[in-house]
């Protein structure tokens, strides 16, 4: 038996990236899966959004494990739409035990950027306000039997970022939301926790905008050129992590192994939020090598 045998898990932003990884891991551990994703591009975002084809591929990967998978193209910003989807899915699968609120977007900007007001409104709406709306949609289905609500925050929920003002502010807001929900829902045995990854190898981070941010406007630069400057974010000598590392944290928090864990913000960040002042040993060594 897997750690999630007999459970039903809902995952927003489930079409690709971390959402796909979480869906497959939960299914491998015995859960049936409900996926939602808007599967559209955002005009103010620098990279392409997920597609219905991405969602179909995730469904296929989940069903390959032998578990059931329902998928819905839905906008998490619309609480009525999310209620309809959740009601329909729970009516078919019979229960709801874990909710992974995983969707999110990023668009690099500063407080002085052109269009900063519109970017702020969009990112705060998607990355913070809609998380609250998803919780509103799922809690009625979890109150009787309890369960686990997990929120994909970010290392940027715990430390500031350059050039990503709205993203960092919204992610910081998620920690306050998670801790408050953990207090409000504890009587129902609904645990609420956040996972805070460093940069992850998904389209939200691996895109042309981040190549420019780390490497300048030279069009010849590639992801390989981004590795060293990305690695400066972390204590451990890695430029980014793979989605499966985040999925392992989600599985722990969703399972009975964490049955007494609630209200935490768990970093899975290669040490990004624990860096002492100065430069990391890795960066010091690299600077010395470059000076020779």
Image (spheres, rainbow, N blue to C red):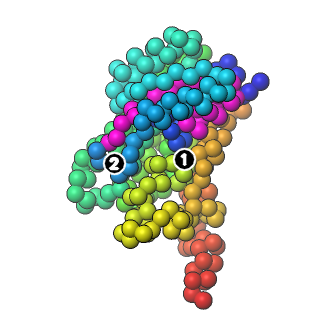
Which stretch is magenta? Answer: 20-42
Report which quarter residue 97 is drawn in.
Answer: top right
Against 132, residue 189 (above or below) is above
Badge 2: few (under 14), some or many (20 or more) residues near its Cα, within 10 Å? some
> Foreground residue, 155 or 2?
2
Name the residue carrying label 1: 196
Residue drawn where x is 46% and y is 13% of the image: 88
Residue 136 position, x and y percent, is 42, 23
> Would residue 18 be seen by someone viewing this image from the given angle?
yes
On screen, residue 169 versus residue 183, left or right, reads left
Name the residue carrying label 2: 45
Q: Residue furthest bottom?
A: 292
Against 138, residue 158 (above or below) is below
Residue 286 position, x and y percent, is 60, 77
* The N terminus - image quarter: top right
Report which quarter residue 105 is drawn in.
Answer: top left
On screen, residue 142 versus residue 74, left or right, reads right
As helix, strand or loop, the secondary structure at mark 2 comes to loop
> Foreground residue, 275 or 25?
25
Residue 139 got which mark? none
Labels in figure, total: 2
* The C terminus - image quarter: bottom right
Against 177, residue 89 (above or below) is above
Residue drawn where x is 63% and y is 72% of the image: 282
Q: Find out whether residue 233 is within the magenta segment.
A: no
Q: Foreground mark, 2 or 1?
A: 2
Residue 173 position, x and y percent, is 42, 43
């Amino acid at each position: 038996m897997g750690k999630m045998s007999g459970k039903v898990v809902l995952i927003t932003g489930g079409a690709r990236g971390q959402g796909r990884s979480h869906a497959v891991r939960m299914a491998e551990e015995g859960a049936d899966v409900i996926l939602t994703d808007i599967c559209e591009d955002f005009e103010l975002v620098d990279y392409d959004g997920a597609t219905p084809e991405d969602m179909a591929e995730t469904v296929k990967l989940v069903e390959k494990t032998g578990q059931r998978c329902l998928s819905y193209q839905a906008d998490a910003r619309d609480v009525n739409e999310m209620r309809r989807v959740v009601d329909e899915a729970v009516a078919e699968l019979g229960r709801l035990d874990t909710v992974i609120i995983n969707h999110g977007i990023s668009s690099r900007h500063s407080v002085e950027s052109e269009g900063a007001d519109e970017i702020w409104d969009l990112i705060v709406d998607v990355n913070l306000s809609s998380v609250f709306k998803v919780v509103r949609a799922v809690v009625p289905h979890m109150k009787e039997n309890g369960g686990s609500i997990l929120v994909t925050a970010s290392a940027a929920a715990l430390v500031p970022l350059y050039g990503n003002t709205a993203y960092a502010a919204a992610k910081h807001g998620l920690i306050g939301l998670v801790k408050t929900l953990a207090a409000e829902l504890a009587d129902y045995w609904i645990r609420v926790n956040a996972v805070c990854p460093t940069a992850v190898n998904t389209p939200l981070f691996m895109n042309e905008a981040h190549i420019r941010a780390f490497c300048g406007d030279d069009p010849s630069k590639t992801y390989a050129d981004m590795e060293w400057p990305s690695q400066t974010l972390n204590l451990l000598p890695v430029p980014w992590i793979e989605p499966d590392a985040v999925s392992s944290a989600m599985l722990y928090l969703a399972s009975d192994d964490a049955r007494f864990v609630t209200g935490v913000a768990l970093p899975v960040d290669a040490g990004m939020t624990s860096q002492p002042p100065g430069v990391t040993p890795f960066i010091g060594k690299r600077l010395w090598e470059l000076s020779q």
